[in-house]
Amino acid sequence: MSYVLNEEIQEILGGQPKLTLEESSKEFIIQGVYEYSLDFDGYIAQGERKIKLTVVNNFPNSIPKLFVYDNPKKMEHIYTDGSVCLATTGEMIYFLTENPSLIAFVHKFVNAFIFTMHWFEKYGTYPFGDRSHGYKGSLDYYLGDLKLTKEQYKAMVSIIYGNRYRGHMPCICGSGRKLRACHGKYMLPIIKNPAYKNEFLNEACGILTEDGKIVSKKSTK
């Protein structure tokens, strides 16, 4: 574990007396009762949640995983094993590339999700709007935030899968700029990092097969 990661874990534990740390040769498990007081647009959410946050020891080269065990009923984005869909893989990879900090990750994704849980439990709605569950929500990030078409997203997947990235090639989005000066900034960190690439391609498999369904030619148009 790097010195910086050690410092950040200790800082998190220092502000959360009901959390404990377990270490193994591969990962670090922060678990227990997470106390929160979160402010969004003047609304303050306060309370406690039983959580587990797993951090692989090569962080930030792997994405942490959050588990919750007292989640509101009927809330999507929480799987049967308690693991949470914090955001799309591409979104988290780009964030960690720009902000290689566990504390920043907790503030950006964990706290936002816990605030969402609190809000959903109280009002039955999602405070930040709700991205679709499953492959549709993942695809929304690439179509909405990255402003790609589905065919352009497929081109992105193909380049990453086949290690065919060339900075001087035209960008997949059709902007007329070179890839390195456009969407390459989202792609290169994935290509350079085997763990990121594996997670990205796992997500892509779900998107392109519609979460495992057999997609006919007609349905992909």
Image (cartoon, rainbow, N blue to C red):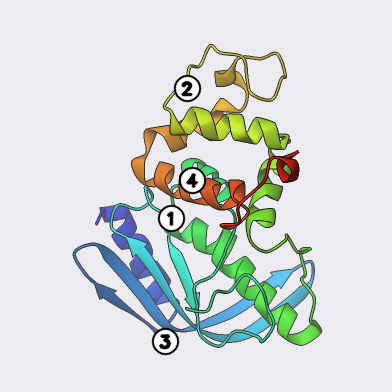
Mark before the other along the chain sequence, 4 or 1 = 1
* Dot 1 crowding, Cα within 10 Å, few <14, some 14–19, many 20+: many
Q: Which label is found at residue 165? A: 2
In the rendered view, would you say 9 is above or below 88? below
* Dot 4 crowding, Cα within 10 Å, few <14, some 14–19, many 20+: many
Real-space CA distance between mark 2 and mark 1, rounded to the nearest whole angstrom:
23 Å
Mark before the other along the chain sequence, 3 or 1 = 3
Mark before the other along the chain sequence, 2 or 4 = 2
Mark before the other along the chain sequence, 2 or 1 = 1
Real-space CA distance between mark 4 and mark 3, rounded to the nearest whole angstrom:
34 Å
* Dot 2 crowding, Cα within 10 Å, few <14, some 14–19, many 20+: some
Image position of 1 (left or right of 14): left
Which residue in the structure is indicated by mark 3? 18
Q: Amino acid at mark 2?
A: Tyr
**Mark 3 touches mark 1? (CB < 8 Å):** no
Mark 1 residue element: loop
Q: Amino acid at mark 4?
A: Phe
Q: Residue at x 60, y 46 (%)?
A: 208
Q: Nearer the viewer, residue 121 or 20?
A: 121
Which residue in the structure is indicated by mark 4? 200
| Front of the two marks 3 and 2 | 2
Q: Amino acid at mark 1?
A: Ile
- Quadrant of res 182: top right
Q: Which label is found at residue 205? A: none
Q: Nearer the viewer, residue 210 or 166?
A: 210
**Mark 3 touches mark 2? (CB < 8 Å):** no
Q: Residue at x 67, y 45 (%)?
A: 216
Which residue in the structure is indicated by mark 1? 63
Mark 3 residue element: loop
